[in-house]
Every structure is written in C-alpha cells, then in structure tokens.
C-alpha cells in the first residue's frame, strides 16, 4: 500500500544543511500497522511528511495505493492526498468550531456534497465514540477526546491510509491505551493501513505488525515484528523482550552482553573449544590477539569461534569460567556453557516463539523428552498486536556437546537459531 525507495530529504538554511532522511526504503502492506521508532531528531516526522508530500523529498520515490506521488503535480497531489488521512500529536483542531464542525470542515475541504455531510459527520463521530459530544468545543474536551476528533476528521474522506504523527505522545497511559485500541479497531474494521511514528516502545508493542528503528535519518532495522524477534542481535527484540543478560554469567563476574560486545569476540574459523578444554580456548584466543586482551581485561579471558559458528569464551584467570556460544556470538540467540569456578558446565539457550506456539509447553516438553533439569533465567510472554510471542533464556546442565540433541530439537522446532 505504501512503497518508498531511496528517500532523501535535506533541509537547507543559511546556517547549513541537515540531512533529515538519508536513503530510506520502506514497504507497508495493505492492512498493516507499521511503526517507526526513533529518538527526537531521528527524522521520523520528516519521513512521515514526505509520505503525503507535505515535504517534497530531494530524491526517491513515494507510491501510495499504486500512485507514485513523487511524480504528481500540485493539483493531482491535492486529490491523491484525500486517500491519506493524518493525525497529529497536538490534534490541530479548530478552536472556534464544535466537534461536529471540525469534522464537517474536513468534508468541506474535500468538496463533499453538502446534503450528505451531516449524516457522514454523525457516522464518523459514532465510529470514534464521540456521538454524544458533537456540540462541544475543543476546549471542553479531554486530550483523548480531542484525538478522537482528530481521527474522525482524518477519516472523513474514507482514506485507505492513515499517517499518525506521535498521536499518543501528549496523552496519559490510560488514554493512550484507549486511542491505540481505537486505531487497532479501525485497522481491523476498515482495513485501514496505518503508518505511525513514535518514540514509545509500548505503541509498537500494542498495535504494530511491523516496525523500523530510525536513527540519523536511516532505518537501522526493519521488518515484521515476529521476524525481528527471531533475528539475531535485533535491537527491537531486545527492547520488546528484555532478557536478564547479566544472570548467566554472574558467577563468572562478567555479563554476557558486555563480554560479547567488548571486542572479546573472535571470528569463526578458530579452533573449536568446548567446556573443559578451556586451555585450547586460551590458545585460540591468544592467536586472535584482540580477543585475548579484551577478554582478559574483562576478567573472563578468551573467546574463540568454532568452525560451525560455535564461539567459546574461556576463563583466563583461575575460576573465571567458560562461556560457549552457539550461533551468532553477538546475539541473544545463543547457547552457552559456563564452568563456574571450574565446576559444572551449563548450556544457555535463548528461545523465541510466536503465534500459537507461544502457548505450547515447549520448555516442559524439552525437560521431559531429554530428561534434563531446565532452569529459566529470564523472559516473558507478551501479547503483541497481531500475535502472542514469548522469549526465554534457559540453562541446561552440561556442555553444549552434552546438550547437542536437546539444542538440535529446539532448532528443528524453529524456536532457537
Ligand atoms: N523545517 C526544518 N528546517 C530545518 N531543519 C529541520 C526542519 N524540520 C526538521 N529539521 C531537522 O531535521 C532533523 C530531523 O527532524 P524530524 O523532526 O524529522 O525528527 P523526528 O525524529 O521527528 O524528531 P521529533 O520527534 O523531535 O519531531 C532534525 O535535525 C531537525 O532539527
């Protein structure tokens, strides 16, 4: 429904120029709710305003409902814009007009015949739950009610696409929830495609089927939420489902993420080392130089990548422990082994499930099938917009080698990578 490619927008002034959108590609399918998350100044508003051409991009193409807006002249654009509604953080209502008057204004602008306007206004106010406030003035409304007027007005011309510019940022959590519920309801009832920008993760969690993270004018990550949850190293997955990353390595004194992001990673291809063969791990790491140093500073020691993508972190100092990562070493989708104080090894596995599988007893099943004592180190189950999803970090006693079948079973079920 919305296709954007190579979008760029630079603001130029006497003081210099600011690249607000720096080569964004985006595809929003019909009926999708797509959220663009980012901090202030990331370029979100500019991106949104380029979708309905309130800002003319310098480069790139914007196509909405099959119509390439970037090719249209001013008059054609005015007609095309009627298919794209927009709501704003501060509602942008006319203070001198009543609720009904504000909605009617949108119909006047689009040139809707006078005869049907009154009935259409009543229908729209019913749709957003404001039928009883038709004669009130904006100053007499709560923030949530004002936004409902904004939504009714945006839907006046029966658009297929709704752009939402931080629509809930000025609202308290309870009102935010009711507006998000309304947007989701409209999305489902009218088949409305929604592109929203927000700095609130909760908004994405509640109603988005897809999302992107925007930083410095670019998308650093983008995709369907269910796919992102399974993507190794996904920022969005980490923010939506924080796992207790410090827990697995507490005994070794180094948080998993700190060790992995601290440069202690050695590229795959180094000799594979696991569990008790920590000495070999030290050697592999020593060969990798940076890996050894970073690890040693962190008090953990050496990390070596195996041919099969198995990373090993071994304690350089006595009793520091061993961490073995299976899969991408920088991601949360890892399985690890730890020898606290030279003691028992533990295999750490991250599990991600979505859809009906989120309600299946995967962990209990694993425990039964492999007669293994599973410890849950962190995680949760959430209801996202379209689906239930869960992420857990679990610990299995023994080395990854000893748990190979159990981990393979989880991989085959597609719940770990
Ligand atoms: N009209 C303008 N003239 C000059 N620079 C602008 C203009 N509008 C935005 N910018 C700059 O472009 C960059 C992106 O701004 P934009 O408002 O798109 O970001 P944002 O992510 O929506 O932030 P916020 O949530 O604070 O609105 C910022 O550096 C901003 O200062």
Image: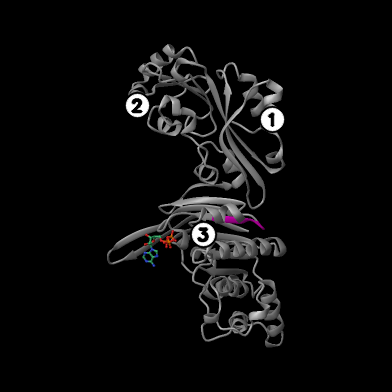
Task: Report which residue position mark 1 lands on.
Answer: 364
Comes first in the chain, label 1 or label 2: 2
| Picture quadrant of residue 128 | bottom right
318 up-or-down from 16: above or below: above
Q: Nearer the viewer, residue 273 or 345?
A: 345
User: Residue 40 location, x and y as percent?
Assistant: 41, 58
- Asked which colour scheme the image uses, the reply is one colour
Foreground disc of the pair 3, 1: 1
159 up-or-down from 292: above or below: below
Number of residues whose C-alpha sits closer than 10 Å to that of mark 3, classed few (under 14), some (14–19) or many (20 or more):
many
User: Residue 51 location, x and y as percent?
Assistant: 53, 63
Task: Report which residue position mark 2 lands on.
Answer: 294
Q: Which quarter shows the C terminus?
A: top right
Q: Residue at x 48, y 19 (%)?
A: 339
Q: Which mark is residue 197?
A: 3
Gap between marks 3 and 1 measured at Cα? 39 Å
Circle 3: element type: strand
Q: How many marks?
A: 3
Q: Nearer the viewer, residue 78 or 212?
A: 212
Foreground disc of the pair 2, 3: 2
Q: Nearer the viewer, residue 329 or 18?
A: 329
85 up-or-down from 350: above or below: below
Comes first in the chain, label 3 or label 1: 3
Report the span colored magenta: 30-35
Instruction: Say whether residue 34 is magenta.
Output: yes
Would residue 347 be found to the left or right of residue 251 on screen?
right
Q: Is mark 1 within 8 Å of ligand 1?
A: no
Q: Is mark 3 within 8 Å of ligand 1?
A: yes
Would residue 407 be found to the left or right of residue 263 on screen?
right
Q: Is residue 75 visible?
A: yes
Q: Residue at x 58, y 81 (%)?
A: 102
């Amino acid at each position: 429904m919305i296709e954007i490619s190579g979008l760029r927008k630079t603001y130029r002034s006497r003081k210099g120029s600011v690249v607000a959108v720096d080569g964004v590609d985006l595809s929003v399918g019909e009926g999708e709710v797509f959220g663009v998350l980012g901090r202030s100044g990331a370029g979100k508003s500019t991106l949104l305003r380029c979708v309905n051409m309130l800002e003319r991009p310098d480069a790139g193409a914007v196509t909405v409902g099959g119509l390439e807006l970037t090719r249209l002249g001013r008059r054609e654009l005015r007609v095309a814009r009627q298919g794209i509604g927009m709501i704003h953080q501060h509602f942008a209502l006319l203070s001198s007009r009543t609720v009904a008057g504000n909605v009617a204004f949108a119909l006047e602008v689009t040139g809707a015949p006078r005869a049907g306007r009154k009935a259409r206004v009543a229908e729209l106010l019913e749709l957003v739950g404001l039928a009883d406030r038709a004669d009130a003035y904006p100053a007499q409304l709560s923030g949530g009610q004002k936004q409902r007027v904004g939504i009714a007005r945006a839907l006046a011309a029966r658009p297929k696409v709704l752009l939402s510019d931080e629509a809930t940022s000025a609202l308290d959590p309870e009102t935010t929830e009711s507006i998000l519920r309304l947007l989701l309801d409209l999305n489902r009832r009218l088949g409305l495609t929604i592109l929203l920008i927000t700095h609130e993760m909760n908004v994405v969690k509640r109603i988005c089927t897809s999302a992107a993270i925007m930083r410095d004018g670019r998308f650093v990550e983008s995709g369907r939420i269910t796919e992102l949850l399974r993507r190794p190293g996904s920022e969005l997955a980490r923010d939506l489902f924080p796992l207790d990353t410090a827990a697995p390595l507490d005994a070794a004194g180094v948080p998993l993420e700190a060790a992995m992001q601290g440069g202690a990673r050695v590229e795959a291809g180094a000799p594979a080392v696991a569990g008790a063969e920590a000495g070999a791990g030290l050697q592999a790491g020593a060969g990798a130089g940076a890996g050894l140093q970073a690890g040693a500073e962190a008090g953990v020691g050496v990390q070596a990548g195996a041919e099969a993508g198995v990373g090993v972190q071994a304690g350089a100092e006595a009793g520091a422990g061993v961490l073995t990562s299976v899969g991408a070493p920088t991601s949360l989708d890892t399985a690890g082994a730890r020898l606290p104080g030279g003691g028992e090894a533990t295999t750490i596995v991250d599990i991600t499930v979505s859809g009906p599988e989120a309600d299946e007893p995967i962990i209990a099943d694993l425990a039964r099938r492999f007669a293994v004592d599973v410890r849950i180190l962190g995680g949760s189950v959430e209801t996202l917009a379209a689906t239930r999803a869960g992420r857990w970090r679990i610990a299995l006693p023994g080395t990854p080698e000893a748990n190979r079948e159990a981990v393979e079973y989880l991989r085959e079920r597609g719940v770990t990578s």
